[in-house]
Image (cartoon, rainbow, N blue to C red):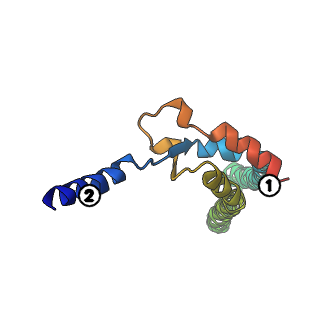
């Protein structure tokens, strides 16, 4: 009876060590930027960000011109008028700085939301690929020190996402 118990425990303990855990990794940045849906999203985001940056640069240029006018008129106007102009300019400059900060925060928030939506969209494709190929864990390439190339499924997922999501 003791021998049977020892053999039974031996097989139970070793059966867990033989269970295969399949791990794969992806380059998430590459996955997002090389899929068709990701390319379109990033083109749209970059276009809107560039437009907003051009608007801000135009406003900044106008402020710079105004500053130069104040400096040039320094010897031509009264000291009281100069102080008044400098005060108004500083207010405009502070307003611009807060507007710029606010706009940059909005752009970053929009980018984050859009990327999160994209991840949500492609997540179902990744999950179904995991189920079909019996993959237990997928890790981002950035978090891996070293791994064999055969575990990289980035290109396969890019093709699958491009076929699945249009």
Does residue 151 sit above or below 6 in this rendering? above
Q: Closer to the camera, 16 or 114?
A: 16
| Between discs 2 and 1, the one toward the N terminus | 2
Q: Identify the mark at residue 8; answer none if there is no mark.
A: 2
User: Residue 50 location, x and y as percent?
Assistant: 77, 49
The structure residue drawn at horizontal position 53% and vertical position 43%, both measured from the top left corner, is 24
Mark 1 = which residue?
48
Q: How far apart in space, not on screen, are marks 2 and 1 (Cα)?
A: 66 Å
Q: Is residue 45 above or below residue 155?
A: below
Q: Is residue 36 visible?
A: no
Q: Nearer the viewer, residue 144 or 86?
A: 144
Percent x, y of residue 166: 85, 53
Q: Residue at x 62, y 44 (%)?
A: 29
Q: Position of residue 145 (x, y in %)?
A: 41, 37
**Where's residue 66, x and y in %?**
73, 55
Residue under the image location 67 percent in, 68 percent down: 88
Q: Relative to residue 22, is residue 166 drawn left or right?
A: right
Residue 103 visible in the picture:
yes
């Amino acid at each position: 009876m003791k021998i049977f118990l020892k053999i039974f425990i031996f097989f139970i303990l070793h059966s867990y060590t033989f269970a295969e855990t399949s791990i794969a990794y992806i380059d998430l940045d590459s996955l997002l930027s090389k899929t068709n849906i990701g390319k379109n999203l990033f083109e749209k985001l970059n276009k809107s960000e560039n437009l907003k940056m051009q608007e801000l640069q135009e406003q900044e240029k106008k402020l710079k011109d105004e500053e130069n006018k104040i400096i040039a008129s320094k010897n031509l106007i009264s000291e009281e008028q100069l102080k008044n102009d400098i005060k108004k300019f500083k207010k405009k400059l502070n307003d611009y700085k807060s507007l710029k900060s606010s706009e940059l925060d909005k752009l970053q928030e929009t980018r984050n939301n859009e990327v999160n939506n994209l991840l949500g969209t492609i997540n179902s494709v990744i999950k179904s690929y995991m189920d079909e190929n019996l993959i237990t864990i997928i890790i981002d390439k950035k978090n891996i020190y070293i791994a064999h190339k055969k575990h990289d499924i980035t290109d396969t997922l890019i093709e699958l996402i491009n076929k699945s999501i249009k």
